[in-house]
Amino acid sequence: MPKPKLFKIRRAEQAKKFGVAAFTLKELIRKGCDLFQLCENGATQCCLYEDGTILTKEYFRRLPDNTEVVLLSDGQSWNKLVYDLGQVLGIDRHADDLISAAQKLQEGEIPAKWRKMLCDLLCNVNDNADMENRDDDKDWFEGIDTRFKTKSSYMKYNCEQRIRGYMKEVQGFAKTITDAKEKHEYDKIVASFAEKLKSARYHGTYFDRTEKEQNRLCTPEGWFSCQGAFDQDQCPLYHSINPYGNRENRILFSTWNLDHRIEKKRTIIPTLAAALTGNKSSDVNLDYFYNLLFTRVNLKLVHIVCHKKGAHDLTCDPKLVFKRVKKTRK
């Protein structure tokens, strides 16, 4: 008599697994439903835990004992890497909190396990990059305000929010200026930057794949490439990601940095404020500082692994701080 095959079975949303013996795929699914207290039609198929391959009758016969499988309900899919990432972060992979948790990966050193998981995930998750509209890829838009009808419009907004964040830091520095005249001149600069950013639509085009090539950082399909650390000409690991492909990639893209080569907080803003000592805002080369703060003149798109948090040791060019060479006062 043939022996039944032994399996370890689990649900897609549960970590707990059970040992099951089954002669056929149909029996395996039926026993899985009994174990997890599902109705007779509660699950329609099983897949391999490792790579999500859907089991067929023929494939079932070739599987070795103790193969780990996942019981799937109708419409469910499985990706081990996404599941493992959720387990490491301690949250459900479909929860909105995954966004903020992924962003927190920027804080501190990244364990090697997480790093590999993130890299593998980018290569293995399902890809719907060819879909653009909300109605065509509803999963991608999960948790996103309904006013966004296309992926490109949301990605543009995403970039705008990053640039707006930089502007808030520039504005916030005014609180540290104690001299009334210097603060007044600094406020003029802030107002000038605000107008220029508004005209440039906060450079949201950097993340918009529908924009012209010279205005975006991605391919027409939505692929972004890491540009390497601030002191490198390119990424040695060739990191890439397409946040347009699926929701998981969109979330992970939030961990990529628009990094300032010459540092914003440590160098650019303090140098800008210092330039107002004994000078007017009209004396300062505002275009130079604007480009350093908000444009690709000084911004690099960097994968979290390539992002160096230590001091960059790069300074502003003293020859470009002012519009003209100031005469030394006697």
Image (tube, rainbow, N blue to C red):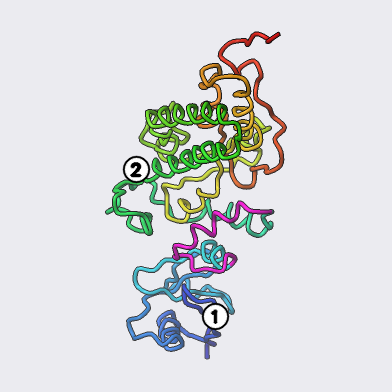
Residue type (three-letter) at the residue carrying disc 1: Lys
Q: Is residue 95 left or right of residue 330?
A: left
Find the residue positioned furthest to the left: 135
Is residue 288 inside the magenta stretch?
no
Spatial CA distance of label 1 from label 2 is 40 Å
Is residue 107 inside the magenta stretch?
yes
Quickly name the residue at label 1. 16
Q: Position of residue 157 (x, y in %)?
A: 39, 43
Quickly name the residue at label 2. 153
Q: Quadrant of the C terminus?
A: top right
Instruction: Look at the image and tell me whether residue 26 can be seen.
Output: yes
**As drawn, 216 above or below 72:** above
Q: Position of residue 256 (x, y in %)?
A: 55, 45
Badge 1 or badge 2: first in the primary sequence: 1
Q: Secondary structure at mark 1?
A: loop
- Magenta segment range? 88-108
**As drawn, 146 above or below 260:** below
Q: Residue at x 40, y 81 (%)?
A: 26
Residue type (three-letter) at the residue carrying disc 2: Ser
Which label sits in the foreground, 1 or 2? 2
